[in-house]
Image: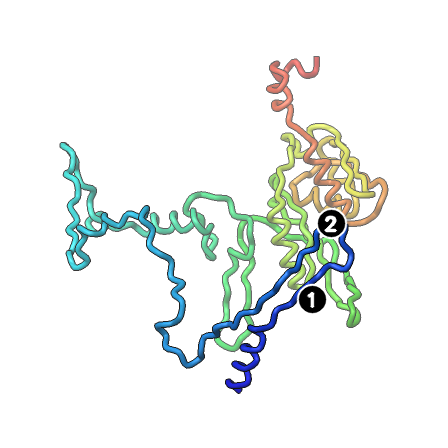
Amino acid sequence: MASTSSATLSSLSSLSLHATPRFSLLPNTTTTTISLRPLSLPSPLSSSSSRPNFRPKASADVETTFFDNDDPEEIDVFDPPEAPEGFIPPPSFDEGPLETEDEIAAAYEELYGPAFSGVSVLGNDIYVMDSKMRKIGGFGSKVKKEKVRDGFEERVVQVRRVTKVVKGGKQLHFRAIVVVGDKQGQVGVGVGKAKEVIAAVQKSAVNARRNIITVPMTKYSTFPHRSEGDYGAAKVMLRPASPGTGVIAGGAVRIVLEMAGVENALGKQIGSKNALNNARATVVAVQKMRQFHEVASERGIPMEELWK
């Protein structure tokens, strides 16, 4: 194989091609000669010393003199600066006094909120019923929850069975509407859904405690003035009444007024008869009311001049 390739290269080296242009516009014709020389191919068995060196040459612009004086085995000693005059070092963490349990509880509540017991060290208002529940029961028994004794009474307005249509069929749930109040001017309306009636009532009670409002009342336990409120398609009209009249209203409006502590009032449902919308419309109408001293302070006049 090697002899054949060398014979071929030697025959090509003696070959010369003469190219004469067939059509030329120039008066003089030239002859072009192409000569082929034998190629020197490197042998695969040659030593590594004959291979070309492609390593880049060191540039004269790179300065490496700053490494000459460094000893890699030398151990550097940290020399801190001197402290200024009058400097008092802070006390160590272990030398300070230990934190009390109240300080630890206050720091925990500031970072993560009140604990599960529901006791607020910082004095925050807590209306979440679940945090005040106390679980009673042993191993293997059902978990029971004790009702919260926070001064609020609960009254169920309505419990309905609702159905949700999904891909696999229908899901049955219960929706409960609960009104909570202390009968001293604090009332709230809540709604909750669950697969069981008891769980739905508990959820709605928690939601009602989160939406507590204050009802303005006079010394005769009635409204200071008339008001109207609407929520959705429901509209509620509220009027004050003289002592001894009682609460003349129906449906959810009567329950909201009784739980708020109103004893003399007139109420009327105008529009939709939906219990949830009428209860929330009553809350909207109550929020529009203001006391006489609040209006007098906004106007900058004494309260006696409001009726002049």
The relative height of residue 258 versus residue 29 in the rendered view (above or below) is: above
Image coordinates of residue 178 in percent, x first then y, are: 68, 53
Q: Residue at x 53, y 75 (%)?
A: 141
For residue 170, side relative to residue 98 (left or right):
right
Q: Residues within 10 Å of mark 1 (few under 14, many from 20)?
A: some
Residue 43: image quadrant is bottom left
Residue 173: image quadrant is bottom right
The relative height of residue 270 versus residue 16 in the rendered view (above or below) is: above
Q: Nearer the viewer, residue 45 or 31?
A: 31
Image coordinates of residue 73 in percent, x first then y, are: 16, 59
Q: Give the position of the C terminus as an image quadrant.
A: top right
Q: Nearer the viewer, residue 37 or 207?
A: 37
Q: Of helix, strand and loop, which one carries label 2? A: loop
Residue 220: image quadrant is top right
Q: Residue at x 64, y 33 (%)?
A: 216
The relative height of residue 223 versus residue 251 in the rendered view (above or below) is: above
Which residue position holds label 2?
26
- First in sequence: mark 1 vs mark 2: 2
Q: Looking at the picture, which amino acid does disc 2 mark?
A: Leu
Q: Of helix, strand and loop, which one carries label 1? A: loop
For residue 174, side relative to residue 120 (left or right):
right
Q: Residue furthest right?
A: 271
Q: Nearer the viewer, residue 120 or 89?
A: 89
Q: Looking at the picture, which amino acid does disc 1 mark?
A: Lys
Image coordinates of residue 111 in percent, x first then y, are: 43, 49
Which residue position holds label 1?
195
